Amino acid sequence: MPAICILDKFEVEKNERFLKIAEDLTPPLLEEMIAPESLITLGHNIKGEACIDSRKPLDTLPGLMLKKDDSVILDFGTHHVGYVTLDLSFLGSHPDAPAYLYLRFAQRLDELTVDMSNYEGWLSKGWIQEEYVHVDVLPSTLALPRRYAFRYLEIRVIDTSLKYGLTVRSASLRAVSAVKMDQVAPLQSFDPLLASIDQVSCRTLHDCMQLVFEDGPKRDRRMWLGDLRLQARANYETFRNMDLVKRCLYLFGGLTFNDGMLAGCIFLEPEAEPDDTYLFDYALLYGSILLDYYEQTNDRAALEDLYPIALRQIDIGLSYLTEDHVIPDHSGDFWCFVDWGDGLNTQAASLAILIYAIRYALRLADHIGDNATIRRLQEMQEVLKESAIRHFWDEEQKLFVSGAEKQVSWATQVWMILARVFPQDKCHELILHTIDVEPRIRMVSPYMVHHYIDALLRCGEEERALQEIRRYWGEMVQDGADTFWELYNPYNKNESPYGSVALNSFCHAWSCTPSYFLRKFFGRKKTEHNNS
């Protein structure tokens, strides 16, 4: 089912000074020329999953003559983002008809086995990474203008003519990113799985760091506010590109609408423009991004510029409260994301995220010296904590519930813990009880699992947090991830909110945070201890 919230009436408020600051921070994209490593053929394992059946060396490629319905799959070794060039020629008589080609780009092998002609999901077919190309003159160089995110490239000949066959003399990729992988030293751990998880996390972040922190270089290829928060945190522990974080903060701050409201995401082309989508939780978390950035850089000018915007998101959030100080269960004018997942009720989590965001706003206000705001928000924070307990705590179940149906979910418990609605000792009891109960409404996105790891660490459960990283992201590695995925449900690995797993993003920003946790909270001695 579509999950969108389009604002019917809004006016964009542009701050030209902020946009100029953002423009001046536009990074140069660093380029690297990549050749395929081998040719592969597909097979299936005993689980029925796509796998590599055989490999051939790359030097066999120019000698292959491809006629009607023939194909070849190139393996570029790992995931990349960039622009492909094919050097094409022919064998046989002089071409007397165009070569008609089908090109399919895949982040995972499984994508090469899906028949996308039957796709009827709610996301546009325009996101499918495929091209139908006529080549009128051979030999020729085919430089594809569109940027792709992929590891595998299938070249299929729809038709040539009876008189000749197509040959691919070479293929190359001009890979692009705002950073280089060799800027980050390997994780110092003797646990090979953690080292692999960290490497895949860094590659995920690397490929999403383009002219902004993109949420996914395959889809949606733009900057979402919730993804930015997690990317920035991982960036501080890895590439440390502070200017890119600052650029993104100023882009959001320079493109507000509806009395200071922040958009859920920003488009860059043909010029920077906010999407007509408002996400309640994403907007509230802008202050968290600003605080993290300031504490990393001590950039006082940015703090003073953007503090009013962060504070405005809190006031907008407070405006949704009822007289009983709760967020309405259903509202047509905003969307609180929290997590992908069928049937997840977000009412209680919405209130918890508002409380969580107020805590960051208080710290920003303290840095600014805004004592009046500190007093006002401290009082409101206590009112909202009391309201959360009064309306959503189920004493019999010892769990928080949400919505009219009193739904119990992992997400609700996690966000109430992060909001510190209870003292730490009772939060600790709650996280252990949640693990024991295992609520039926599970977490399905790495975005939500990130917050679960955060909650475990805040409750002092470092060993469980590390084991969860091994279990969740480690299983993705075991499933062949070169970069981490937008959605991963170990209980349903083909789950998709879009109608087809082929529309899922398999290099996604909010999935990169194991590097943040492993490098910030677990040093070499810690990971060695936990592996023993």
Image: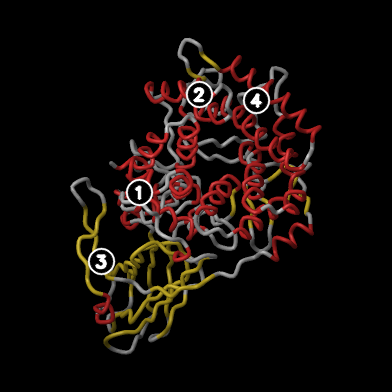
Which residue is rendered at x = 24% and y = 82% of the image? 63
Packing grade of label 2 (10 A; few <14, some 14-19, many >=20) is: many
Tag 3: residue type? Ile
Res. 417 mark:
none
**Total number of numbered labels?**
4
Which residue is rendered at x = 63% and y = 22% of the image? 385
**Secondary structure category for the residue under label 1:** helix
Closer to the observer: label 1 or label 3? Answer: 1
Mark 3 and mark 2: Cα distance apart in space: 51 Å
| Dot placed on the residue nearer the N-terminal end, 2 or 4 | 4
Q: Is residue 188 above or below residue 283?
A: below
Mark 1 and mark 3: Cα distance apart in space: 29 Å
Q: Is residue 530 above or below residue 20?
A: above
Packing grade of label 3 (10 A; few <14, some 14-19, many >=20) is: many
Residue 78 position, x and y percent, is 36, 63
Mark 3 and mark 4: Cα distance apart in space: 53 Å
Residue ID for mark 1: 194
Of residues 313 and 161, the one nearer the viewer is 313
Q: Is residue 380 above or below residue 12?
A: above
Question: Hey, which residue is sitting farthest right in the picture?
Answer: 372
Residue ID for mark 2: 427
Q: Quadrant of residue 359?
A: top right
Quick check: 396 left or right of 106?
right
Of residues 455 and 63, the one nearer the viewer is 455
Closer to the observer: label 3 or label 4? Answer: 4
Tag 2: residue type? Cys
Residue ID for mark 3: 40
Closer to the observer: label 3 or label 2? Answer: 2
Res. 327 mark:
4
Which residue is rendered at x = 39% and y = 61% of the image? 79
